[in-house]
Image (cartoon, rainbow, N blue to C red):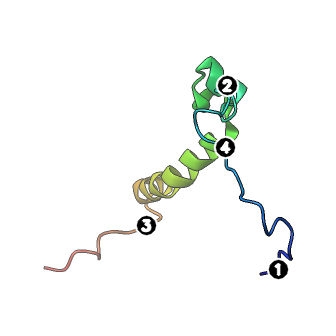
């Protein structure tokens, strides 16, 4: 489907884990054993995206911008 007849008679050989060089999947930081939180901005963005809504909610409740007094019904 969509590939044509390229390599129709050939059996495709995949690389195995044993044949793979050790450094293939490792970045320089991973090889050196660095903490990704020190060097990777995407790690910081991910943590911020997870925790920011909760921190913002607590700050808004503490400042009175969100009123919880009517939230409890007896």
Task: Say whether disc 3 or disc 4 marks the residue closer to the N-terminus.
Answer: 4
Task: Say whether disc 1 or disc 4 marks the residue closer to the N-terminus.
Answer: 1
Q: Which residue is mark 1?
A: 2
| C-alpha distance separating marks 3 and 2 | 43 Å
| C-alpha distance separating marks 2 and 1 | 39 Å
> In the image, what residue occupies the spot 70% across and 33% down?
24
Task: Say whether disc 3 or disc 1 marks the residue closer to the N-terminus.
Answer: 1
Per the image, label 3 sits on a secondary structure element best described as loop
Q: Furthest-top residue in view?
A: 32
Quadrant of the snapshot with the C terminus: bottom left
In front of the other: 9 or 65: 9
| C-alpha distance separating marks 3 and 1 | 57 Å
In front of the other: 21 or 51: 21
Q: Which residue is mark 3?
A: 66
Q: Which residue is mark 2?
A: 29
- Mark 3 vs mark 1, foreground winner is 1
* The quarter of the displayed image where residue 43 is located: top right
Against 65, residue 21 (above or below) is: above
Which disc number belongs to residue 15?
4
| C-alpha distance separating marks 1 and 4 | 24 Å
């Amino acid at each position: 489907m969509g590939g044509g007849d390229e390599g129709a008679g050939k059996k495709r050989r995949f690389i195995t884990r044993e044949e793979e060089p050790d450094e293939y999947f490792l970045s320089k930081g991973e090889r050196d054993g660095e903490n990704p939180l020190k060097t990777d901005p995407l790690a910081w963005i991910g943590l911020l995206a997870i925790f920011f809504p909760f921190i913002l909610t607590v700050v808004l409740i503490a400042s009175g911008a969100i009123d919880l007094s009517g939230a409890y019904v007896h």
